[in-house]
Each structure stands twice: as structure tokens, then as C-alpha cells.
Amino acid sequence: MTTDINTLLTALYVKIDDWLVRPRRAGRPPKLSDAELLTIAVAQALLGIRSEARWLRLLPAHLPGAFPYLPSQSGYNKRLRGALPLLKQVIRLLAADTDLWHDDVWVTDSTPVECGRSRPTAKRSDLAGWAGYGYCSSHSRFFWGLRLHLICTPSGLPIAWTLATPKTDERHILTAALEDDPALLSGRHGQLIIADKGYVSAELDRWLTDRGIRLLRPSYRNRTPHPGEHLLKPIRQLIESVNDTLKGQLDLELHGGRSIEGVGARIAQRLLAMTAAIWHNRATGQPLTRSLIAYDH
């Protein structure tokens, strides 16, 4: 099968449209279906066009005849923000449709999602009260925004994710993410989660052990190393590679959101694009699971 963006979008549209089969509601049907909306959103993220207005102008020329109706920029923005719950559901739908969903090893970490730099922005933004100041150790700088907490397989398939203020403890986020979705741990006794030193907590260890989950992370220098700890470093680098895909190829930090709904929808849009690429690559037997090169032009 040819691996290009047209093939991916066609398969994605069919998958979502089949899944969205539901009783016909009274009234006039929308000109742009939910399946078309999400397909357009994934194409925008993969092609790296951050401006919604520019994307809607380029879409007829780039994918001629694919979408009979296109909304205005404000209409597209409103539909996309309102589709955040649907975006989350489709990410899970595609992830669970791959063999990678049953991987018995997960990696977890958080990465900054900057939302503004100036002091007036921090004070007047609609994100005030949600976003906050935090420190990015990899870039040795402070930032104002949110942090994306991601649990994924070593290949980068998203298992669970959430956005939180930078001051929120990573250990609490991990507990909340797993507790809010009980089905996530169903039938996964013995699941291994690999994390960094920020997840050191006897209370977290007990909470996970009670659920049959094992957490492996580096020990502090004054602690006795865990068995097999010397093998952690290359595995922990995988989550950094996933974050690099999100930031370097899908412009995670250039989301352009100005409200909590807008930021959430744009982050979900990029996670869905990565999930769709992984899903399609696995289905077509591609050698590189997380490669986006075939879909970025």
C-alpha cells in the first residue's frame, strides 16, 4: 500500500466515520461532519500549517475535492474547540486498534507547553488561573504556560495524557491519570512504568503496587540502586524522542491557543496526528513506527 498523506487521511476518515455511526438527529445535518473535521485537523497538524486561516485557503489546492464544504476560520476554530472530548475519544480509538496498545511497558514524563512570555499576557490572558510559571531544565529557563504529562508506549503510542499547571506534582498527575480511567489498568497486572527521579515516592509505589503496577525509576545517589537500573537510561530517552516528535515535527509549542479549550484542542490535535501516523504505519507494516516523513508534504 502506498504510504502518503492521502492514503492516511482516507483510512482515518473511514475509521472515524464507521465508529461515529449513530441515530439520525432531528434537524438539518451539519455541512461538515465530525469525521471530516477531525480528518482536516490531522492533515493540518501533519503538514505543519499553524495558521487556521491560511490552512483553509490552502486546503482546496492541496487536497482538491476531498472536502466539499469548508467552514470559515472562526467556524473551524469553534468546531475544533468544541470537539475536544471527541479528539480524546478518537486518540483512544486508534491507539487501542494497534498491537502496541497491549505493550507491557509504559514510559511517562512531562514537557512544557509555553502559552505566553510577556507579563501583561500572563495577567490578562484567558489562561490566567490555569497556566503558571515553571522551570524547563532541558532549556535552563523559566516559562509561563502548562505542562503536558504523557504516558505512552516506548514506540510513542499515547496511552493517557493531561495538561496541568507547572506547579502540580508529577506524582499526583500520574495517580490522577490512572485513577480517572479505571479501564486503563484492567487486565494489566504486572504492567511496568518507567519514569525519572521526579516520581520517587513511597506512597506512589504503594498505590501502584496495590493495583499490580510496577514503577521503575533512577534512585538518588544516596539510595541503593534498583536491580536493572543501569538499563533505564536508553529506555528513558524514548520519551524524550516522543516529545521531540511532538515539538520538532508537530509544533507542540507553537499551538497558538489563547484559552484552556483552545490549548487543549490544539494539543489533542497534535497527539491525534501522531497517533494516526503510528496507527497507519503499523497497519501498513512500515519499518519505522513513529515516522511522519511520508505525511508532511
Image: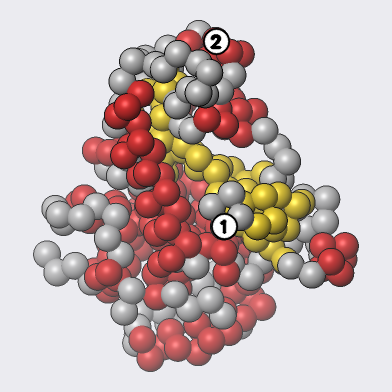
Q: Mark 1 to mark 2: distance in Å?
A: 33 Å
Q: Residues within 10 Å of mark 2 (few under 14, many from 20)?
A: some
Asked if the residue under mark 2 is in contact with the one under mark 1, i.e. CB atoms within 8 Å, the reply is: no
Secondary structure category for the residue under label 1: loop
> For the residue carrying disc 1, how many other residues have a C-alpha within 10 Å: few (<14), some (14-19), or many (20+)?
few
Residue sitting at the far front: 222
Per the image, the residue denoted by label 2 is: 206
N-terminal label among 1 and 2: 1
Q: Nearer the viewer, residue 260 or 220?
A: 220
* On-image quarter of the N terminus: bottom left
Question: What residue is at 45 percent from the left and 26 percent from the top?
Answer: 217
Residue type indicated by callout 2: Arg
x and y percent of residue 25 in the render? 56, 56
Describe the element under mark 2 as helix, strand or loop.
helix
Marks counted in the figure total 2
The disc placed on residue 110 is none
Residue 128 as seen in the image, left or right of residue 258 = right
Q: Quadrant of residue 110?
A: top right
Q: Which kind of residue does numbered mark 1 sit on?
A: His
Q: Is 201 above or below relative to 159? A: above
Residue under the point 74% across and 67% down: 117
Residue at the spot of label 1: 139
Residue 118 percent coordinates (x, y): 79, 70
Q: Nearer the viewer, residue 220 or 255?
A: 220
Res 284 visible: no
Q: Where's residue 123, x and y in %?
A: 87, 62
